[in-house]
Amino acid sequence: MAGIHAPPVVYGNGPVCYARFPERRMHDTGCILVGEFQFGPEISFERFGELEDILKTAIMELLGGLGATHLELGSSGDHLQFQSQAPPLAPEELAKACRFFIPLLDAGVKGRVVCVPSGFGNVLTVFFSWRGVELVTTKAP
């Protein structure tokens, strides 16, 4: 994965924040990434806050490395969500990217990332938890 040339510029620090990666333009083609983490009832309120901060930082680092142009993060209840635009990703690249989160997850935390490519390509979904990742491909008609 490519490194970040400059750190993202972050706007807001409440339930919703936005990040813009300097020196990058929006992709004419590529994919939209939509991801979420769900925190189970076994995660304490204090641990939820810690994990949310850890995962927000990890999301910005990972998506910056993938060449994302922007990032929108939001949290609601026991969920942390993100949306971003990135260059095209092969299924193996997306699965590898999601493995980046595994060491950061407690039991009781699960996530998924959906990759919707431009041009009506196959939709990729990676489900993950501390136990591993599962890649599901939905074939385009």
Image (cartoon, rainbow, N blue to C red):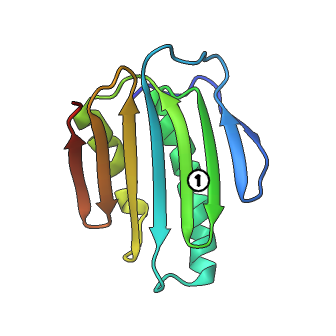
Q: Which residue is mark 1?
A: 56
75 with respect to 136 (left or right): right
Is residue 100 shown to the viewer in this render? no
Residue 31's x, y, as percent? Answer: 42, 28
Q: Residue at x 54, y 42 (%)?
A: 83
Q: Which quarter of the figure has residue 112?
A: bottom left
Mark 1 element type: helix
Q: Which quarter of the figure has residue 95?
A: top left
65 with respect to 48 (left or right): left
Q: Label 1 amino acid?
A: Lys
19 with respect to 64 (left or right): right
In the rendered image, the quadrant that contains the C terminus is top left
- Foreground of the two, 31 or 66: 31
In the rendered image, the quadrant that contains the N terminus is top left
* Residue 120 vertical placement versus 127 (above, below): above
* Residue 93 vertical placement versus 74 (above, below): above
* Residue 33 vertical placement versus 107 (above, below): above
Q: Residues within 10 Å of mark 1 (few under 14, many from 20)?
A: some
Residue 96's x, y, as percent? Answer: 29, 42
63 with respect to 129 (left or right): right
Residue 77's x, y, as percent? Answer: 61, 72
Is residue 92 shown to the viewer in this render? yes
Q: Residue at x 31, y 39 (%)?
A: 94
Q: Residue at x 22, y 54 (%)?
A: 134
Question: How many labels, in total?
Answer: 1
Q: Residue at x 24, y 35 (%)?
A: 91
Q: Which quarter of the figure has residue 133?
A: bottom left
In the rendered image, the residue lying farthest to the front is: 141
